[in-house]
Image (cartoon, grey):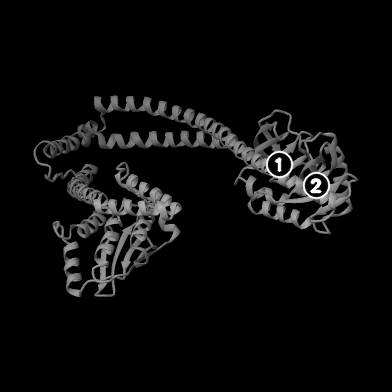
Amino acid sequence: MDYRNAVKTEKTKFQRELEKMVSKRIIIIILIGCLFFSVAIIVINTVSQEINSERHLEVISANFSDVYQSTADFLKHNDNIESFLYCIKKEKNPKEINYLVSKYNVEAKVDINLILINQENQVVMTNFSTEDMNLHRIEFNRIAANNARGNGEDIYTTIYFFKTDEPEYLMMLPLYDQGTYCGTVAAYLKNTDWNNCLSQGQYDTIITNERSDIIYCSNNSLIGKNTANKYIGTDGSKYVTLNGNRYFRRSKNQENENICIYSFIYSPENSAYLLIGVITILGLGAVWTIMFFHMLSMMSKKTSESVELLVKEIRIIRKQDTNHEITLRTGDEFEEIAEQINKMVKSINELNHKNVELIQINGQMEMQNLQERMNPHFIYNTLDNIKYLIVSDPIKAENMIERFTHILRYSINNTKKKVLLQEDRVYIEDYLFIQKIRFGKRFDYTIEIENECEQFFIPKLLLQPLLENSIKYGFQKKTDIHIKIGGSMQKEYLYLVVEDDGAGQPKATIEMLKSITNREKVDTKHNGLQNINRRISLEYGKESGMTIESQENEFFRVVLKLWMGENCV
């Protein structure tokens, strides 16, 4: 046997120990992975369904209570009752009742149709159409009115079925005048309106009364064909199978309205997922083990030397020279690692430089913005305006105080460095509103920011210096100015524009400003615009920056271009 081949095939103690240690850990990891995968799937699925079902029930319960209470308040309102009684006694003036119903339906979550009957169960007034006011409804309304009268003077509820899939929730109130029964008012809640306030995405809902009559059902497949008007879910099982589909079901009794709310969350069997997951983990574990030992036998001899060389180079970077470039010619993966470390060290050094500069710029801008926002003249002018408005226009004064308070709080709060454009827009509107009060008809503004732009993050108070510049320089040569703030998305970039029709600047000045804003060294005179441009360039990259355009005595426009790749909500 060749000695050299024997040396190559012989495993060192390091290799044997490494293989033994790795084998144990691979087996343990595979078993733990199977266990955790199975437990996680079951627990997460169960907990998620419990939480989602509870939230779903709470939302449905609250919305139903709102509808019920709103309708009850309408029926019990003293002025409305007087109108109902007057209509019954005089058998006229139904227009007033129609007006009351129309006014209620404008703000109601679920619209109502009204039927008003006298003590002989004759219809005095209704806003149902002739087609809907059929004999079936009239007879049902008469029977329900007798039941309502026997129920006392409180609200009586029942359900009207004409079509099996369109139940109408009915709320009736007997009407009495000095203890004498005069008639009944009945409010039929429109079935088609329930979906607007009870539909909750992928979750289904059934609402029944104490007699298991269905008030609302979001999915008719949940109900058997032979029991289209009723649902009885008293078996106590959390998981039910309906029409071949498995659901997680929970219910909640609402005693105030005498209803029961059922929540259904689609929940297919997860045993197949568990089996597939376990088999996948075991298969990957077996393949991983075979490949690992095969690679280990080939690479272990070279690994020690490569690692030692790499460690020596890294120690030089860590202890002696942070700009040192690793030179490694081992012909294996560690040579690639060394190249990546060189790139990483270079990137870290560049990033540190950028971060230091960005911190300095942010600090300068925060101090500058804070000083300008706290300008005594701005505060005094605002307070003087408030003082004047308190006497002449208290409502506008109150609005101005509220906006001024928001400006102060928003400006001083340093807990956020970046905010949604939507938040900064509120500040801008408050600020420009105060300036509008100050300058009156001499100043006007428009804000045209597309809705999709408002969900992107920008540096807080990014536009504030630009607005102040427009006001400060715009009034130098003109008595009236208009400021326009715009926002739009083009591909991956957010464009913000601040433009005024004030004094503008000559071409030479604009060229000077462009030159200054593109410098890396901060200019003391125009550092506001320069800081904004440098901050955008450092923080957003990818051709982000600022563009200045102007025409003397016509306009002055600043356009900010921000790459939004990682700055969305």
In the picture of the structure, the residue carrying the numbered disc 2 is: 85
Q: Position of residue 66 (x, y in %)?
A: 64, 41
**Horizontal relation, residue 189 to residue 22: left or right:** right
Q: Residue at x 71, y 56 (%)?
A: 99
Classed neighbour count for the residue bearing mark 1: other residues with Cα under 10 Å, few (<14), some (14–19), many (≥20): some
Q: Earlier in the sequence, mark 2 or mark 1?
A: 1
Determine which quarter of the picture holds residue 285.
Answer: top left
Residue most toward the left?
A: 320
Callout 1 secondary element? helix
Residue 443 is marked as: none
Inspect this view and state whether residue 162 appears: no
Q: Position of residue 550 (x, y in %)?
A: 26, 72
Q: Is residue 519 above or below residue 551?
A: above
Q: Is 398 in front, or is 547? A: 398
Q: Position of residue 110 (x, y in %)?
A: 68, 49
Q: Residue at x 25, y 54 (%)?
A: 377
Inspect this view and state whether residue 318 appears: yes
In the picture of the structure, the residue carrying the numbered disc 1 is: 72
Q: Is 365 in front, or is 207? A: 365
Going by the numbered disc 1, the residue's amino acid type is: Ala
Quarter of the image with the N terminus is: top left
Q: CA distance from mark 2 to mark 1?
A: 17 Å
